[in-house]
Amino acid sequence: MAMPRYRPLHLCLLILVIYTAPSIGLLNGTELLKAACNQTSDYAFCYATLTADPNAGGPQALAGDLANAALRLAQTKATHAQSLIPLLLQNATTSLDHNRLQMCQSSNNKAISQLSSANNDFNSDSLDTMVEEINTAARATNDCLNEIQDKGTHFSLLATINADLIKLYEICIVSTRYFTVEDLY
């Protein structure tokens, strides 16, 4: 059987494709941030949030920097919600509002626990587990949001925090799709 003959041009193109193939899709900095934010439900929120973080918005930012920034911000917002709920409970005027807030308190505690675990898994490179935990936190946060959204102005701040939390979870998960070997070291 005769071996196929490659012309020098074909061989050069093949070498070029092999040489550049690993770098296709490897983005960092602003291009990565734009690509990741384009995959979220709220580009403007994603872009503004990540560019405000010097590590995530910097020219050398990797996908891990984006995910880490979103995860840290989610933990901060969830903690803010945790401190807000008892104040809302004190001011609840109906038993239905009280029940909604108790459910939110339980959901928020679950979300905070899952975010803590996700942070530990992020730091130990257990990305599949981290994504599962963030999804669990998102479901818990969404449960609360469904209970309080459009139920009165006294819930509006908590509803806004929860809506932002869900967007931060999304940013974190989307960012993991862009992880490269560099993000794991």
Image (cartoon, rainbow, N blue to C red):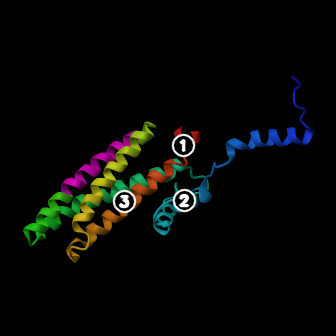
Q: Quadrant of the C terminus?
A: top right
Please say whether residue 13 is one of the residues in the magenta stretch: no
In the image, 183 versus 41, the foreground residue is 41
Residue under label 3, please give it.
166
Residue 111 image position (x, y, % from top left): 28, 51
Q: Residue at x 64, y 49 (%)?
A: 25
> Does 75 appear above or below 157?
above
For disc 3, the neighbor class at 10 Å (few under 14, some 14 to 19, many from 20) is: many
Looking at the image, residue 178 sits to the left or right of residue 127; the answer is right
Q: What range of the chain is rendered magenta?
A: 105-121
Marked residue nearer the N-terminal end (1 or 2): 2
Q: Residue at x 43, y 42 (%)?
A: 122
Residue 145 image position (x, y, % from top left): 27, 64
Residue under label 1, please give it.
183
Q: For the residue labelled by badge 1, is the local secondary structure a helix, a strand or a loop?
A: helix
Looking at the image, residue 127 sits to the left or right of residue 31; the answer is left
Residue under label 2, please give it.
57
* Residue depth check, mark 3 versus mark 1: number of the one nearer the observer: 3
Q: Residue at x 89, y 35 (%)?
A: 6
Distance of label 3 from label 1 (alpha carbons): 23 Å
